[in-house]
Each structure stands twice: as C-alpha cells, then as structure tokens.
Image (cartoon, helix red, strand yellow):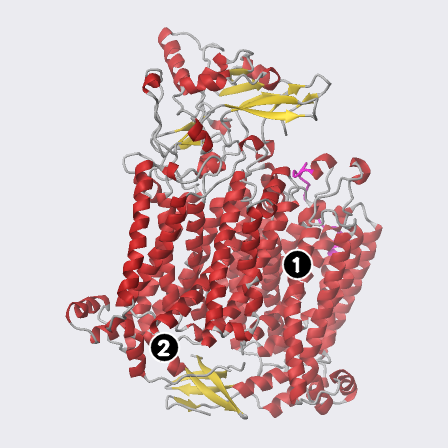
Amino acid sequence: MQQRRILDEVAINHELLRGNLATPKWWLPTVLGLLVVVLFGFTLMGIMFNKGLGVTGLNRPVYWGLFITTFVFWVGISHAGIMISAILRLTQAEWRRPVTRAAELLTVFSLLTALFFPLIHAGRPWRIFYWITPFDFARGIFPNARSPLVWDPFAIGTYLTGSTLFLYVALLPDLGVLRDRTTGWKHSFYTVASLGWRGNPRQWRLQTVAGILLSALMLPIFVSVHSIVSWDFAVTPSVEGWHSTVFAPYFVVGAVHSGVSAVVTMMAVMRWLWGWDNYIRPEHFDALARLLIVVACAWLGFTFAELIFGVYSLEAPERALREMQMFQWPWNLLFIIFFLTAFAIPVPLWFFKRVRNNIAMMFWTSILVNIGMWLERFLIIVPGLSRKQPFVFTWDSYQVSPLEWGLLLWSFAWVMMLMLLFSKFFPLIPLFETKESQVFTTDVKIGRVNMPAVIRELD
Amino acid sequence: MVTAAERVSSHKWGMAVDVDRCTGCQACVMACQAENNIPLSTEDIYRQKRTFAWIRIERYWYGEFPNVKARFIPIMCQHCENAPCEPVCPVFATYHNTEGMNVQVYNRCVGTRYCGNGCPYNVRFFNYWEPTWPTSLRNQLNPDVTIRSRGIMEKCSFCVQRIRRVSRETTRDGRELQDGDIETACTEACPTNALVFGDYNDDKSRVSIMRNDDRKYTHLDALNTDPNVVYLAQVDATGGAAGGHE
Amino acid sequence: MVTSSLITDAVDERPSNIEATATLAGEGRTAVSSGLKLFMWILAALSVIGIVGIVFRFINDDGRQDWGYYAATVGWMLTIFGGAPMVAIAPALAKANWVRPVARIASLGAVATSVLALLLIPLLFKLPALTEFSEVLGDDVRRRSIWFDSPDYAPHFWNALSLATLALVGMFMAYVMAIPDLAAIRDHGSGWKQRWAKKLARGFHGRPQQWEWLKMRIGITGALYFATLMFVNFLFSLDFAVSMVPGWKDSVFPFYHVITSFQAGLAFVILGAWASRRWGGTEKFIGQEQMWSLGKFMLATTLLWFYFFYSSFIVFWYGRSESDTATIKLLVSGPYIYLFWTVFFLVFIIPWWVMIWNKVRDSLWGPPIAAVIILFGLFLDRIRIYVASWSAVPDDLELATTSILGDMPETMWPDIFDIFIMVGLPALGLLSILLVTRLVPVVSLWEMQQSRLISKPIRFLRGHALLVGKPD
C-alpha cells in the first residue's frame, strides 16, 4: 500500500536545499578524495599521450578493448535520464517526480565521461578535430559521412546538447527559489542563471511546454544514440560476433537496463547521504524495480536472439568465437559472472516485494546489474576481435593493462565528483516537482479502503 | 560513389600469388621490411603481440602425424575493390585510388583503428610506439618512403614509391610501360617467383594470365571484398587441387 | 473522500451502472440488426470460398512455392489476432484506466487465434523437414535452422504446439475476463443467452474470493499469454520465413515480427472500437479518449516498425557480403520492390504523417483510417516476407547448405485460389469473433463498473480533470 506523505512547502524547501544552503560535513573530504583519483587519472592520460598507446594492452588484432567497452558502458548509463524523465513524463507516471533531476544529471555527466574514451583512445588525440568537427580546415576534405565513427559525435553531441537543455529547463524554477534564499556572489550567480524566473502563469506554461516538447524530441535522439553506437560494431562484416542485425535495439534496451539500475544506485546513495527519507521512498524503488523487470526480460530476449543467431549460421569462425566467449577460460568465468549479475541474480530477487522495498537490497542488486552490463559490452567487443575470420594464424588474445584499469577507475571518480560538485550548487531533487506532486495526488475513500489517487488533466 | 568500372585509369595494379610455388622462405618479408622502413619487430614487440609485417607467411599444418605437411600462404593487403576498411575511416585516411589500390594517407590518420577492425585479413598495422632504429640501421632506411610516426595505421602499399618512380621514368623516356618494369620488393625477392606483380588492364601481363588460371581463388569470397590479390591454389601431389585452408 | 480546496465536484456524464447493465447485459441486446446479420452471412460465404481455395490449393500443388500466399495470410492473421489481446494486458498491468472499455474487443482476438491454429495444419504439411537435403547430399546434411540436431520434424511439432498453446491461453484469458459479464447476463438477460451464460458463469456471484481468484487468473494468464506470444512469433518467423532462405541471418527479425503484431493488434482494436460504436450501440462507453490513447500507441509502434526494419537493413546494406546483398535483394530491392515501397508508405510514411497530428489522433475518425491503412500495408508486408521466403526453393543444394542464396527467385503472382484463400481465411477469423459477440458483450460491463468506482470527473480549479485511484 502506497502511503502518501503530506509535506508543507516550507519543509520541502528546507529539506531539499539542505546540501545547497549549508555544506554537509562529509562533503569536502569526499570531494577532495575523489579529486585525488581524478588527478591520478589525468596523469595516466598524460602518460598515454606522451608515450603512445603502447602503454595499453591493445594489440593486433584486438584494436579495441577496455576503453571502447567503457565508452559504450557510459553511453549506456546516460540512457537513464531520458528514459525516466521523458518517457515517464509523457506517460504521466506520478512516481517519476523525485527521480527526474538525478536521472537527467546522470545522463549529462556520464555522456561527458563517455566522450573522453574514444578521444583519448585515438592514436593521435591532438588531431581529433579532423574527425569530430564537420569542417574541412586546411585539408580540403570533410569527415567521411559513411563512417559510423562520424555518426557518433553527431549523435552524442545532439544528445548532450538536448539533455543539458532538458536539465536546465527543469532547473529554472528551483534556481528562482535559490536566488531568493542566497546572498552575495551566490545570489548574483543564481540571478543570472534563473533567467528572471518569477513563477508567473506564463512562465510556468512555457516551462511545461518546453519540458514536454523536449521530452518528445529527445526520444528519437535517445534511441538513435545507442543504435549508432551499436552500428559502430554491427556494420562491420569482418567481425563475426558483431555483424548482427539485432544490435541496435539490443544495445538500447541494455542501455536502459544499466541506466535505470544506475539511477537506483544513485537514489539509494542520495537517500543515505542527505537523509531525504520523505522524498525518496521505498515505493519509488518498488516502481523502478518493476520497470527494471520488464526491461531486463526484454533485454534477455535480445541476448538470446543474438546468441542463437550466432550459432545459427554454423560457420566455423563464428562457432569458434562463441565457444571461446562462453566456454574457454577465462571468458567462461566472465560469461558466467555476466549472466548472473546482469540477470540471474537481480531479476528473480526483484520479483519479491520485500526486496523491491528494501533500499539496501536494491542498492546492491543495481550495482550487480552494472557489473554485468559492463562485462556484456566487454564480451561482445573483445572476443569478436580476437577470433576474426578463418585466418587462425592471426587469432590472439588481449590482456588489460594496469593503466586501462586506472582510467576505468578514473571514470567513476570523475562522474561522482561532478555529481557532488553539482549537488553543492543545485538541488538534486526538484523542488517544484515535489510540490506539484503534493497538489496532483490525493486520497480517495472507496468502501473502507483509503486509496491514493492522481489527477489527470482532461482539457 | 564512383564504382570500379567507372574509374578512368590506364592501370589496375594487382598481384598474383602462386601458393604452389611458395616455400615459406620469408625472403619477401625481409625485402618488404627493408624497402618500406617497417618498424623492427623485436622480441619485446613480439611479446606485446604488435609485430609488423606488411607481408607475412601464414603457416598451416595439414594431415596427421607422420604425414604432416606445412603449407604457406603469403598474406599482404589484398587491395580490395570493395574494401571493408575504407568506408569506416572517419577522416578518409584510407581510400581507393584510381589505379585499383587501397591507399593509406598517413597525414590524415588520427588512429581510431576502426579500419584495423574492419579488415578481415588482419593486414593493417598500428604504430603503438614511436618507431626507432638502432644507429647501425639508420642508413639503410629508404629515403623514398615516409617513416610513420606513432598513433597511425600502415599497411602494404604495393610499393607505390616504385610504381611512381618507374612511371615517371617511362614518361621521361617516352616509352610504354612494359609488364615487368615494375617489381615490388617482395616479388623481386621471391626466389621461386611465387609472387607476381603487374597490371590487370594489360591483357598480356603475367598477372592477367594468372588471374584466368583454373587454380585461381581469392580469400574470403563470401565477404564480397573483391580483392586485387589473387591466389593460385596448391596442387596436391596425391591428386586434386587443395586450396588454402578454407 | 479527502478533497483539497482546489478540487470541486463535476457533473458525471458517464452511464450509470443500471444503464450500463441494461445496455450491455440486459434484454436490449438480443436484437440483431439486419445489417449485421447480412454481414455475417457474407463472411460465412467468404469463409466457404476460403476453404474451397485451400482444397484446390492442395489439388493444384506444384511444390512449396505455391503455398507462399497461404503462409502470408496465416502470418498476417497471427500478426493481428495474436497481437490484439496484448492491448488488453499491457495497459492493465500498468494500471491504465482508459483501456477498460476496449479490453473486451482486444481479448476477443484470441477467438480467431484458435481458428488460426487449425489453419496452420496445411502449412505444416508443406514445411520442409530439417533433413530436406539429406537424400541428395548425404545423411548428415541438414537444412540451416535454429533446431540444429533436433529430430527431423522439430519445427513442425513446436510450431503446432506453441500456436495451440497461444490459442488455449488466449481463449482462457478471454473467458476469465468475461465471467462477471456472463454472470450479469445470467441475472439480467433472457432466452438462450441466459441459459448459456448460466452454464458459463460457473456460479460467479462477485464474492471477494471470487474477485481475488479472477484477478489472479487474469494476471497469470496475461503474463503467460505475453510469453507465449513472443515464443510463437519467434518460432513462426524463424521456421516459416528466415530459415527457408539460405543466407538470411537476421537476428532482429523475430522482434520485428512481434512489433508488427502489436501494431496490427492496436489497429484491430481501433477498428473494432469504431465498428462497435457504429453498429453495436456502444457510443456511451467507447469515446474519444480510447481512440486517442490507442492512436498514440499505434503511432509509437509505427515508428518502431521503421526502427526495427532499418536496424536490419542498415546492417545488411553496409555489410555488403554476399548473403547480405542477397537478403536485401530478395526482400527489398528484388522481385518485390514495388510491393516493398507500397508497404513502406502504407505501414510507415502515411500513418506516421497522419497520426503525428494531435487533431487526427484525438478524433473518432482519424485512428480508424490509419488502422485500415496499416492493416492493409501489413498484409502486403507479410506477402513480401512469406511469399519471398517460400519461393526461395534452392536449385543448387550445395549452395543452400552454405550461407548463400543461389539464383534469385522470380516474382510470384497469386492465382485464383490464392485470392480465395486471402479473402476467405481472414473472413473466417472475423466471423468467429462476431459469433462470440452474440453472447459476450463487446464492452466489458464489469470493467466499466470498476472504472466508475475508482475514477470520477472533477473540476480542478477552473479546468476539467479526472481523479483516478491507484489500487495496489
């Protein structure tokens, strides 16, 4: 039974601005700790630029490895924001409200992180402008529009721009609140940032229309981004494990799986760190877990199709690839871990209401999903490359170097640090959504039951 | 997109490899190394699985002990008409020229290595390190060939520097280019003439004749790459022509 | 009821429970309009023509390529009638209130699915065994399929079993969802309907345990139906299309089949809602809101049609390997190119540009028009897929066991028996549904009453709104 909390608006302001108007004690040490890891990561990148990509474990034929895996992983995580904000907004799911800001934020920051990887992964990173910008400079030629690697910057750039706008539009009313409660330079900052927000009817209408329009516009972009990332692989006929038509929807659903799980992780952390027990409630975890069950089952269907069609062709190299991917050491271990963590452990657990409403359990299962989803990308990218075509003479394996592990660690620290920095200046739970939710929900009494009810606009 | 048939060019360079003649002596590999300033594949590099060999001899064992046979297939860039490496390059660093060759423009390359993944023959090589040569070898570097810096892709160029030089010389002298005027480093070094280089547009050239041989096959037909390097199958003494390992 | 000061009561114009009972379960609905009677007789005549078509198809049978149009028709009916019940399940699982008036129409699709299970039988006779090539090429040579080393007739067995299961689960679900209505007919109706309803209602009196039982059955059969539908689409699309074409390796195709099934199911429900308003006297129950919501979902599936089609197309087109180009040629640019472009416009371009306008979506005439276009387009799409695959009979068996399609088959045109089949079988399916609606009301009475119970029109400040309860 969902319990509606009745909160008054002063309390909402007070509690949700806890991290902005005052600094929690743990904030500075945590950010400094993360900064150390981040600086360490940048040092590693510096070493890589200085010495060359030889410092990684990449070789021939495994030209892509952990960096591209991590790129796909973070692009996947970024799909959470639009999934939750746009789709749930358009379908008027009431429980989305406290989650939206965090999800959008995750989209923006994980995209910023994902962008690093293909760029530092290039052999000559100082020349990538020839690749990512559609301008012919002095060379007289534009980038090659036939290359999926050129579609990537366009797709991700559009997605990043769109989701930043989306985040900003949803932030405006809260910036107005912050402007009114700060002094000094902060006040000036919020004054400029809130774009003269006063909360008059016209502004609210514009803000709502912009939100809905952006939601609808972001949906096709959301689908296209991970489809294009998947086509980086799928359009290559030479690599058996990659050339599969299901890749686009498979990657998109996998991205939603990992992204929504990441939102669950983040919500649990937010609830613990800032004590927002009145806002992030077990029922939100319950709803997210139900959504995750559906997504995970769809994802399993796609995985099954991908594997069965891999064996379907009965061609020798493809069979060798699948045998290595699933049955040869150490890939079989990775494959088992991948399957257990991405599906077999969390999904059956989510079928229990007690697990869905238990925040610690949700936290750990969502972490498991993301371990599994990272491994999934790794298991797609690397075995395909190391067992390419029937020329067994060139088959080879790949060992991840410590530097690559370091940069994987860096990516997590970097996202977390950006999040914490953001939380210092902007509220992580949208104030106006919470207040709107107070107005739009009520209780109805049917017989002896008190039932939560929502108001649907008809006009 | 200009198709192969529409390209106006007097030459279409290609190579024919008679697998039956190949003894696996690796002379072509060494010649190529010397001609094209290929970075040294030291023991260290070998352990990193990053060796360079624009042409390599793949060795496969056939049969059951004690009747085991080694078979050799020289593999270099196949200069596919329908190359999977070309469309995937984001910066046009690799493209098809009008003479049937798949060419690599080192200056354009940013090193995404996508072409390396796209190549089904694994004949594209990435410079993970800045190439270095010991002082004793400095003077043997070929001044006609660019030394590739780190972070870019390289591959067999059909010794394009030789093609250009001979073309210039024939134009200067005002004579027709004859079959056999141009020899790549590997064909020149091959003691059994297993490797032959020439012009497919010249019907009488050796490669054209070999391309019409009954033993002719190309690698990975199913991928539709349409390579300009053709192979002549090994003749099995016990009867029947055994192809490569396919 | 807890009301905040923002909410005031509004006039409730929905039919009262008494009125709804009288219209949907009372004696008023025993009369059959002469138009509907005539229509059902026409359908019966067409069904006979269809059966004649099947018989003559068996007589004039020159190999499996002659059965392409039959397979296409069966595939089309599976797409529509199999997908329709999903419209009843999916929103119900998400607690959507708007779906209640059309849930019955959707669930009745299962009735036609059971007819379809019978229509599968001739097709099973024509489906080649896994050992099709073994006579010529040796015992160990089998045709490429997802069945690998299973017994020779594994696809026949599993397809028959899964489609029968789908029909059974669907019928059971439709029946369970109809029980409270049958009880209402027992209590308020008369004549043969009352007698039948009494037998079928199985003593349902609306006790709390009985409602619990009902809710649980609907939930379980709903989930089971979805799983079976996925499985059936997966098997049917692979065994009756993909694996019959050497070299067609398309892992997204089963999902493409599922998506078209949802699209066709929605189109079917929209047309059913329109027809029941027009001829069934249900204007008071099915309104613009249903059309609007169904239309939104149909627009979404229309866009997904393109997404799934494009996912496979770009991989083939960019891949350029021999099997890739052959697959594109067979299905898109080769013998059926005109058909493909017609499909592309009917299933994607036209519905997209029609349904993207809210004015069209939020109307009583817009979604039905788009639905007709989509259903016709999907019929052509099934022809493009199944006729092409059934005509790809390999001449060169060596090639057929590798991944390359040898010679491109020629365009197959339907003969007169194919036309009989294409007209007759869907008529048979439709007739079976109409026959059932003589007993079961086309709008679910209990869903309407529950909807009245947990939602109510209100005024929110100066606007009109609906207050909807969210039970667990």
- The one of B80 and C263 positioned closer to us in this rendering: B80
Q: State which quadrant residue C39 falls in.
A: bottom right
- The one of A412 and A12 positioned closer to us in this rendering: A412
- The one of A51 and B101 positioned closer to us in this rendering: A51
CA–CA distance in space, label 1 to label 2: 43 Å
Residue B196: x and y in percent read 53, 15
Q: For residue C242: magenta?
A: no
Residue C72: x and y in percent read 69, 55
Quick check: marks 1 and 2 in contact, CB under 8 Å? no
Asked which secondary structure carries label 2, the reply is: helix
Depicted A278 relative to depicted C168: above or below: below
Give, as a three-letter code, the residue at label 1: Asn
Q: Residue at x 68, y 61 (%)?
A: C78
Q: Residue at x 32, y 71 (%)?
A: A207
B111 displayed left or right of A302: left
Q: Both on one chain, marks 1 and 2?
A: no
Depicted A425 relative to depicted A240: above or below: below
- The one of C224 and C443 positioned closer to us in this rendering: C224
Chain of the residue that carries numbered disc 2 in the rendered image: A
Q: Residues within 10 Å of mark 2 (few under 14, many from 20)?
A: some
User: Would residue A257 be seen by someone viewing this image from the given angle?
Assistant: no
A206 displayed left or right of A224: left
Provide the residue span drawn in magenta.
Answer: C402-421
Q: Residue at x 60, y 50 (%)?
A: A307
Judging by the rendered image, the residue that carries numbered circle 2 is A434
C108 displayed left or right of B101: right
Q: Residues within 10 Å of mark 1 (few under 14, many from 20)?
A: many
Judging by the rendered image, the residue that carries numbered circle 1 is C233
Tell me the mark number nearer the camera, choosing from 1 and 2: 2
